[in-house]
Image (spheres, helix red, strand yellow):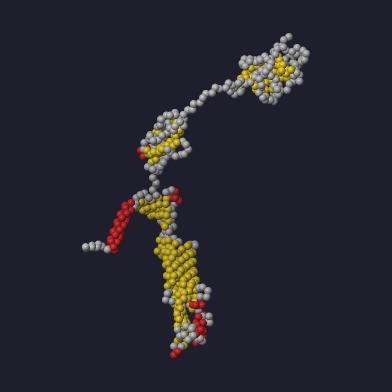
Amino acid sequence: MTQIFSGNSLLQKTTKRLTMGLLTCLTIGHIASAQDLNTKPTIVSSLTDNGITTTTYSNGQVVKTVADGYYLDSAFYKNSNVLRSTKPKSYWKLTDRVGVAIPFCKDGEDKSLFLTPGAYNTLSVNRFWGVLGFGLMGGYQNFGVSEDYKGADGQIAKNAKLLGISPSALKYDTQGNYEDFYLLVGPALALPLSKKFNLDVDLKGGLFNTSAARFGAVTTGALGADALVFRTSPSASKNQLGGLLSVDLLYNIAKTWAIGLNAQGFLTSTPYTVVGGDVTPASTKVLTREYTRTHGGCNFGLALSHTFGEKTGNTTYSLLPPPPAPVVCAVPTLQGENGMMYDNGATTIPSFRWKSTSATPENEEYIFKLYKADGSGTPIYQQTTKNANLSLPANVALVNGDDCSFYYYTVQSSVEGKCLSEATAASFGYRAKPVVQAIVAAKPVEDQYMFKIFGGSTATKYFGGASAYKPRRKARKVTSTTSSTVAPTKPADAVAVAKPKRLVPRRKKSVSGTTGVTTYSSTVNYENVATDPNIKWPKDLPLPKNASVYEYEVQRLNAGDCKPTGTVAKYKFYIDPKKPEDIRIIPDKPKK
């Protein structure tokens, strides 16, 4: 059997795929760029006048570019379709700083290197856009070595003492000072304080190349050769990370030149090597140790800056073409029956018709929604149509048994989904099944009468006193007809009178006195409502002290509103308190 292997390796296949993908991306990018070029508006005209450049594009957009120091007329801002964008002034700034460098470190670490102030020189270049900038900074600084390293507190003296060497036998030497070279990068700020003063701030970070100071001591050994006692020297690992902050207060002496004061602060670390003899007794070995210490300081000096490559800032005002007219949706007008009520059991469906009020009804479509008036607010049927009428499908049932069924529907117009009109609405309903109720015979209404009792005059002359003549005729019974004017009869078994309603007595029109009555009064003594119009002395009305004459008046009350409809009877009667049941009617003309 012969086994066949593919001639293309996995690496070759991967390379081919990456190549094809790259070619495809380049092709698509080229096509997209060509389309952007075709759609990008071209410049129709460009005019510059007094620092203001007006550019008109083929799409109708007008762009006004205002150079720094120039301003548009205030009338320009009245245009409500204006876009404003400001491009800040850009320039390069080169600053050189020189002065005194002062070291500092952690407590006790100065005993190892014994550094003293030195000098520094820093050069930076920044690119500014307005007040913000970014750039590089490079510099050099060095520090001297104090003579204190030769003292009793120094490591040399301590090491010599352990080796048993007399301080007078030591030979000291200083071979080099401490040095720093650095190259940093970071942001910058240029803040104008006034027309003449500026404040520049640089914050940089990067690489420090540090070389520790080189100093030490030897002593005379055997055969006159120098024997090493102690020495400090730079480490092989000189490159360390660090940072620097620089602040310049500058005074503009010319358009592109400024001079001022500088202050700096820096921080890094310093590795160094210590070489000394082994302090072990009878040992002749030389030991080497590696140390790292924190290194920092403050620098103070002068600064000189120069700006170049300045590009004037400008403000761009774009007058955009007017927006297209908004699409307005008109509210349709309903033409179906509104408020129509159908009888119970009717299967009639209302006609849903409307009319467009838009100037272009051919662009409209209508949204129909049908609701049941139960407060849910959820449509039971809705449809979108281009027609101005609609019929409900058969599966939408409106009549709901024998109960009342109320519905309402809304119609809204829409144009290409860009707007939606207010809803216009109408309602309709179906009546409930009528309820058959048994007719109950109405109970006859009992007549009611209002009666009043007036007067209370003493009757002695007319009847001749207690032993004189008394009327023989008794009170007749009054009929219930409205034509009756007299109700004589003595009510043997009188119908009970309704509970009386006592009123405040009031005066009635004065009436001429009756013959035989010494004094006649027209005061209303009693008033009440009863169902029996026949006269009967009320139980709650006190009887007179003497035989007296009163006037009795009866009026029928309307059953509907209880208002008097006419006088039934009106006459005078005689009553003796000794015989209150024997009430006598006084005729208009007494017998002789």
The x and y percentages for residue 239 are: 42, 72
Where residue 325 sits, quadrant-wise, is: top left
Residue 214 in the image: above or below residue 474 = below
Query: Residue most toward the top?
Result: 592
The quadrant of the picture occupied by the N terminus is bottom left
The residue positioned 44% from the left and 37% from the top of the image is 371
User: Residue at position x 43%, y 69% from top?
Assistant: 206
Count up the numbered dots: 0
Left or right: residue 474 compared with residue 286: right
Q: Position of residue 285 (x, y in %)?
A: 45, 84
**The C terminus is located in which quarter?**
top right
Q: Is residue 167 visible?
A: yes
Determine the residue positioned at 41% across, 38% down: 381
Between residue 294 and residue 6, name the one nearer to us: 6
Q: Residue furthest left?
A: 1
In the image, is 403 to the left or to the right of 464? left
Residue 67 higher or lower than 542, as above or below:
below
| Residue 25 location (% of width, % of height) | 31, 57
Image location of residue 551, percent across then percent down: 69, 18
Q: Nearer the viewer, residue 94 or 355?
A: 355
The quadrant where residue 340 appears? top left
